[in-house]
Image (cartoon, rainbow, N blue to C red):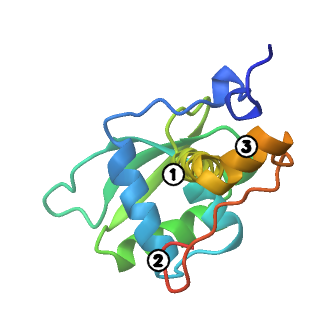
Amino acid sequence: MSAPAASAQPAERRLVPTELGEAWHALAESLIDRGLLTGIARELLLQSQLLQQAEQEAGAAQALWTIRVESETLNHEGSRKRLEGALAELGHAVLLRIECGRVVDTPGMRLAKARAAEQERAEQTFTGHPYVQAMMRDLGAQPVAGSIRFTREPGAQGA
């Protein structure tokens, strides 16, 4: 029997929570919720991992933060400056240093994991319903792959 498609994610793309990952994810959610980033700058945010968050030194205009991305194409000066500007709007005067390499904890990875968990709950809720169970048991019915989708209730946050 083969493993479900959801767990067929390559090992190098699995989320490995890091110490700074939660803080970076929270900042990303704030920036996205406020609509402060679009395009490549938004992708830079979502696909980056915060590695170091140096404190702002006395007299310095900005603190130095280091982020890592896997794709060299995201290491673009204009996108970096837009991300720095958006962070400044949230009260974080920072200068971002970008390095390229393997990432294990990005806001995008955390969002994908949350979406996968929501989808799994939706499928379990559907197949656990007594009517659906009766149809499966009595008529041999089976859900069509990909036909069950998680949707947010009207007015729900984070859609």
Q: CA distance from mark 2 to mark 1?
A: 17 Å
Lower position in the chain sequence, tag 2 or tag 1: 1
Q: Residues within 10 Å of mark 1 (few under 14, many from 20)?
A: many
Lower position in the chain sequence, tag 2 or tag 3: 3
Which x, y percent locates residue 63?
29, 56
Closest to the observer, 29 or 96: 29
> Which image quarter holds the N terminus?
top right
| Residue corresponding to mark 3 | 72
> Which image quarter holds the C terminus?
bottom right
- Mark whose residue sits in front, 2 or 3: 2
Q: Is residue 126 above or below residue 36?
A: above
- Mark whose residue sits in front, 1 or 3: 1
Q: Residues within 10 Å of mark 3 (few under 14, many from 20)?
A: few
Closest to the observer, 126 or 43: 126
The label on residue 107 is: 1
Cβ–Cβ below 8 Å for labels 2 and 1?
Answer: no
Residue farthest toward the top in the current orientation of the protein: 1
Lower position in the chain sequence, tag 1 or tag 3: 3
Lateral position of residue 107 relative to residue 140, left or right: left
Residue farthest toward the front in the current orientation of the protein: 138
Q: CA distance from mark 1 to mark 3?
A: 18 Å
Q: Is residue 27 above or below residue 37?
A: above
Q: Is residue 107 above or below residue 32?
A: above
Which residue appears at 74% of the width and 56% of the height? 148
The amino acid type, in three-letter code, at marker 1 is: Pro
Which x, y percent locates residue 31?
46, 72
Residue 14 visible in the shown view: yes
Cβ–Cβ below 8 Å for labels 1 and 3?
Answer: no
The label on residue 157 is: 2
Secondary structure beneath dot 2 equals: loop
Q: CA distance from mark 2 to mark 3?
A: 33 Å
Closest to the observer, 96 or 15: 15
